[in-house]
Amino acid sequence: MGDWIRERNFSSLSMRDLLDAREAYHVHLANLDNVFATAIGRYLIRDEDPDAKSADKAAPRGSSGPRTLYNSRVQKWSWPCVLVFVDTWQDRAAFSAKPEAMVPQYLYLPDGRVIPTCVVYAESSPRSEDSQLDTVFPTSLLGGGFPALQMVQGRRRMSTMGCLVTDGDQVYVLTNRHVTGEAGREAFTVVGDARQRVGISIGRDLGKVPFPEAYPGWPGSRQMLNLDAGLIRIDDVTRWTAQVYGIGEIGPIIDLHVDTFDLDLIDKDVRAYGAAGGLLKGRIQAFFFRYRSVGGIDYVSDFLIGARRGETSVGTRPGDSGTLWFLEPDEGTALPRGERAPRLRPFAMQWGGQALTAPGAELSGTFALATCLSTISRELDVEVIADWNVGHPETWGAVGHFKVGALACDLVEDEWLRELFMLNQRNIGYDDVSLQRGLGPHPRTEFVPLADVADFVWRSIRRADDNNHFADIDEVAESGEFEGKSLLELTKDQPEKVHPDIWNAFYESIGANKRGALPFRAWQIFDEMTELAADGRITEFVCAAGLLAHYIGDACQPLHVSKLHHGSSEVEADVHSAYETAMLNQFTDELIAALAETRATWTGPEIRCRTGHDAAVATVELMRRTVERLPPERVIEVFNESAGRNRTKKMWQALGEDTVKCIFDGSLTLARIWEGAWKAGRSGRRNPRLPQEAESQEALMALYLDNNFLLSSKLQVLTEREGRLVTIAT
């Protein structure tokens, strides 16, 4: 942009100037055969243009070949302009016979204003409309970023829940109108692999509105703005958090209207978390993108969000509609974060996507279309909630399991073995700093630390593993040979009663088809680890040890080893997630500090395991100490007494000290089982050479995705032969 045009002060053009020009030239641009969309933004300078590096070098327009979204970018010296998207690119010479068919370089207004255009070569291509859910959303508090599901005419519709909002009376979750639908339609989400109802649509929604109604005083008489927003009234607000999954706590909404909409937002980095696409990263490409024109009316979207520099796609997929987009701080600016989650500010809600290609360059990417969140808030007369049940790291329910696994690595007594486990600590769990800062979600396609594979991965691909996560040792038989006894009483001072045949007989006497097999999972894995140690197969040994951490973590949680795991009534159904997930997640800092103090003063029993049966007995005794130290009835009582605001804080104050002791006990028991399996397998032989680095996550992931590795079995098909657990025919 050299001296040949500098006398025009385009840098001072305002949003109103650009909108006036597009409105004045609406008919002209709409009648050009190759124009399929327009928007307003800043001039895109091609990477090969002379002024790509400096504003001082002249760059005669139309002399450098096609400009696409993939070979050009906004520079600090880019002018405000009207962006014109064409599906056919022609050099200026090609218009010599028909110059009126060329997109004007400048748009001249009657009052003397001159507005530059920027022509972009692109093609709009169809996107798949099939939504797919790849992220495993763990059992925990619900929030923005979770999927919203509804059945309409026999077909599943999926979007992403945006955030919590309130009208001052009730609390709703905000998502897209095309999913909420008519009043009374039920809405569901997916937690783990289970569909759960979250509420119903109230029929309060927004569709398309005339542009001047959304932005009073701005021109747009032939434009309709797509808002596409609706509300779902929540059944139980105590199950929700204002945090957005994959994002964390949210900051104040960015209030955009005719007085605050600013071209400086163009090219800013933004992010979102979609239920289908996961973490989405992009940049604001343009404002008021005209994506369709029918019957003389233009349909526009507030934002066109494109890929970041060096990328070709935002990565959004069908099912991401409804997700909130957040503005990121400028590069080099410290994130406005506390000790846990960054508080990014939301500015828009996605309602759709657009696939745009660069013809001839074999480049194609998806772009997000989004609506200004402040407009939605104003038109629906609701406020975004940012402070309900917040303060949770983004592990969402895994803190306990990851901490048990990571701490156990440091509690191993054997020096060589401790070095091996500390080398792999981040393959098994997370270190304290990571837990305190908060962690992102775990898509199925990415490595999950081993201590929570059983929840994040196996619950969806190994149905037989469900029974390995619990054992209701307080269930009392009412008749038969075990009348008046529970497994807790049956096994007290009688380790021989920890036997699959006896437990199957007990479950048979109470008519239980779902039989908790938690101690026998420890027996199974101990046997496998012994063989792996004997063969010197360190990768497999580490993988098996890390996977075992999950089950021992379950054994030291009182609600995993009791018939009262979900309370005794519908009102108490959420006690499990409130205690094991919400409470631990909110008080991660306090948990870590208290565990360090407990380690220094621990006086628990001596634990030694030489066989798989010893490991099962050690697990049962851990379960016994857990329910004696922290009876499930007490957890439920505190849960009920703490109803309302600050429930998790009240629960931590009442239960935190004993919870810490349970977790430390579980970590220590796990470490001793690991040591016992290694020593039994090596049987006095020298240890192999210690690896120089941690086992590769690719190798570990391949193992846990193999259904034959540590085969999961129901208790009904297990028995004991010569000290080992074996599978029998059903």
Image: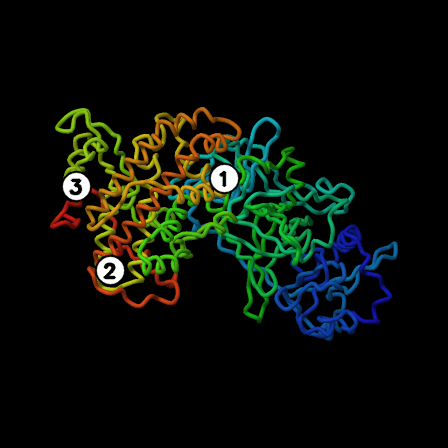
> Which residue position is annotated with label 1?
586
- Label 3: which secondary element: loop
**Marks 1/2: CA–CA distance:** 38 Å
Q: Three-letter amino acid code at disc 1?
A: Gln
Q: Quadrant of residue 89?
A: bottom right
Q: Residue type at mark 2: give it.
A: Leu
Q: Earlier in the sequence, mark 1 or mark 3?
A: 3
Residue at the disc numbered 2? 532
Q: How much space separates mark 3 and mark 2, taking CA atoms?
A: 24 Å
The answer to whether marks 3 and 2 mark residues whose Cβ atoms lie closer than 8 Å is no
Mark 3 or mark 2: whose residue is earlier in sequence: 3
Amino acid type for the residue under numbered disc 3 = His
| Neighbourhood count class around disc 2 (C-alpha, 10 Å): few under 14, some 14–19, many 20 upward | many
- Residue wearing tag 3: 499
Relative to 479, residue 514 above or below: below
The crowd level at tag 1 (other Cα within 10 Å; few <14, some 14-19, many 20+) is many
